Image (cartoon, rainbow, N blue to C red):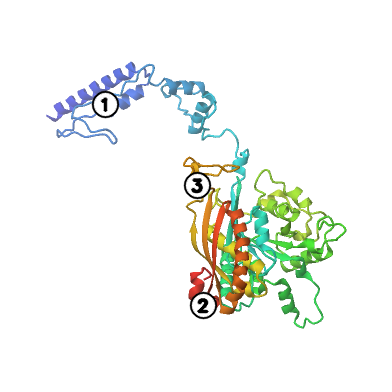
């Protein structure tokens, strides 16, 4: 039995070998080894009657044989075969194994497709990594720029000049700014988030000032770039009565030892603006930048010695507006990432280089150095975003600015303005109600109306005697304040404003923490 079984097995193997050879010949294979492999991979019965399989073969019935799939002589594999032939490589059935890499295959396809307008570029680049486009080589930059300095240095004026808009109120009285105010300047490749802060008070006298200093510290914690605003008088000569040299030096700088330590150890770019250079300019020349005044030169040198690692110490005159050469130079350095900005030309507009203006006594900075001021990153706000403050807040600030300009001595510092109502239902009238140039009547026969905002505000004071001063004789003072404030509001909102002002006593509100929290100072 065993000999018969073995004979049968040999006969089956020979039959499988012959079948595999026939298939290979039909497929055009001239290799006898292929036929042998096909035969050896065929399934054969075991002596015990159970089927067994070669490793890797598919499980089939007991007497099944492996027959390779037949390939069509043309059509199905035409594209693959043509690509190999074009690359000078033979089909594997010809005996040579040399396949194209994925990158070569994609490059071959790229070369065969015509370029047309609107076509999405290929992921395989034909250029080297060094030949990058301008958009890839110049990343978007975004930074939180915090403006710090002692009171009445022109921080809010500088913010308005950089933004080319009147966002923050500014008067000739110190401590006008009480809140941290954000103003955003956005271009194609930059977004600068400028934060105006209250003037630094080294020894707060009451709760309101403590809240103001907390706003300064909060803005400084988040800063990517520091913008220190001082004036030309910060470098005045020491008087003979200055017994404590260190204390007198701190008084002249005015920003306190805590802020100085933060600026020195923050490892972030610091730019110092020596403001109000026009106040010490030569009266005959009239241009503070053509021939930099000696006091401004001393101020630049002084701040360079105090902050030796500062990126720049620039003379400025923010009161001259957005076109002031110092403001233009500062804005150009912050926006150096934009292709249309010429930093060198803006700096040359400051006139003869002042010693200490740049680190290491450099007379000029490069475009690349200016770009590094802002860190690379995506924008934080929408391109149309301007400020995080509401219209109600802006209205209260404009009324408070009028109080600072109208009231004398210490009275404005005891005043707070709260907007009780802000009705803008008529701010955007329908087309039928809009006012035509020269007047006219609407379709219903009534006179056409323009946009209007109705604002009700309350002026808070600490004592009854202060209320009498603000109201004035027969209410004349508060009416004058309301008239001036209304003009500013109409200019700011671009609409007619109806303003209802009232005066109320809120005793000791500046030291009441609960009230300060309610008013947004803590």
Assess disc 3: are there few (<14), some (14-19) or many (≥20) residues with their C-alpha within 10 Å of its C-alpha.
some
Q: Earlier in the sequence, mark 3 or mark 1?
A: 1
Look at mark 1 in the image and give the residue it sits on.
66
Residues at circles 1 and 2 in contact by the CB criterion of under 8 Å = no
What x and y, as percent, mark residue 42?
25, 28
Task: Name the front one of labels 3 and 1.
Answer: 3
What x and y, as percent, mark residue 470?
60, 72
**Picture residue at 56% right of the left edge, 34% below the top:** 125
Question: What is the quadrant of the N terminus in the image?
Answer: top left
Task: Name the front one of labels 1 and 2.
Answer: 2
Give the secondary structure at mark 3.
loop
Q: Earlier in the sequence, mark 2 or mark 3?
A: 3
With respect to residue 450, does 122 lie above or below? above
Disc marking residue 512:
2
Look at mark 3 in the image and give the residue it sits on.
429
Cα distance, mark 1 to mark 2? 94 Å
Give the secondary structure at mark 1.
loop
Give the secondary structure at mark 2.
loop
Residues at circles 3 and 1 in contact by the CB criterion of under 8 Å = no
Cα distance, mark 2 to mark 3? 42 Å
């Amino acid at each position: 039995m065993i000999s018969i079984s073995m004979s049968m097995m040999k006969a089956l193997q020979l039959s499988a070998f012959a079948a595999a050879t026939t298939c290979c010949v039909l497929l055009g294979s001239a290799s006898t080894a292929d036929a042998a492999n096909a035969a050896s991979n065929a399934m054969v019965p075991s002596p015990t009657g159970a089927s067994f399989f070669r490793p890797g073969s598919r499980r089939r019935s007991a007497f099944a044989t492996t027959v390779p799939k037949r390939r069509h002589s043309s059509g199905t594999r035409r594209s693959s075969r043509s690509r190999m032939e074009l690359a000078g490589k033979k089909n594997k059935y010809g005996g040579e194994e040399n396949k194209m890499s994925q990158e070569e295959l994609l490059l071959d396809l790229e070369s065969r497709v015509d370029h047309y307008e609107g076509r999405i570029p290929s992921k395989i680049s034909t250029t080297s990594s060094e030949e990058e486009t301008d958009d890839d080589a110049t990343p978007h930059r975004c930074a939180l720029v915090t403006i710090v300095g002692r009171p009445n240095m022109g921080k809010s004026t500088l913010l308005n000049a950089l933004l080319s808009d009147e966002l923050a109120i500014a008067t000739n009285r110190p401590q006008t700014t009480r809140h941290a105010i954000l103003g955003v300047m956005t271009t194609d490749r930059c977004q600068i988030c400028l934060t105006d802060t209250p003037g630094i008070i080294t020894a707060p006298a009451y709760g309101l000032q403590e809240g103001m200093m907390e706003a300064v510290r909060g803005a400084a914690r988040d800063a990517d770039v520091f913008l220190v605003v001082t004036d030309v008088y910060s470098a005045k000569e020491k008087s003979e009565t200055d017994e404590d040299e260190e204390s007198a030096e701190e008084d002249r700088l005015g920003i306190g030892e805590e802020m100085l330590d933060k600026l020195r150890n923050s490892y972030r770019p610091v730019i110092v603006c020596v403001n109000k250079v026009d106040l010490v300019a030569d009266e005959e020349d009239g241009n503070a930048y053509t021939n930099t005044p000696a006091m401004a030169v001393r101020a630049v040198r002084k701040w360079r010695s105090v902050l030796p690692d500062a990126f720049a110490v620039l003379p400025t005159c923010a009161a001259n507006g957005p076109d002031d050469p110092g403001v233009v130079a500062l804005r150009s350095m912050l926006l150096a990432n934009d292709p249309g900005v010429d930093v060198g030309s803006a700096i040359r507009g400051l006139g003869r280089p002042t010693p200490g203006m740049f680190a290491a006594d450099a007379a000029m900075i490069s475009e690349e150095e200016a770009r590094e001021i802002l860190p690379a990153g995506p924008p934080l706000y929408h391109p149309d975003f301007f400020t995080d403050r509401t219209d109600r807040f802006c209205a209260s600030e404009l009324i408070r600015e009028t109080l600072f300009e109208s009231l004398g001595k210490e009275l404005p510092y005891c005043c707070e303005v709260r907007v009780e109502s802000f009705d803008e239902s008529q701010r955007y009238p329908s087309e039928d109600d809009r006012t035509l140039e020269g007047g006219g009547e609407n379709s219903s026969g009534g006179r056409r109306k323009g946009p209007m905002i109705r604002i009700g505000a309350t002026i808070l004071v600490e004592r009854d005697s202060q209320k009498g001063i603000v109201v004035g004789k027969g209410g004349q003072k508060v009416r004058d304040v309301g008239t001036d404030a209304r003009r500013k509001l109409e200019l700011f909102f671009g609409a007619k404003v109806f303003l209802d002002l009232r005066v109320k006593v809120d005793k000791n509100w500046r030291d009441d923490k609960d009230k300060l929290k309610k008013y947004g100072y803590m």
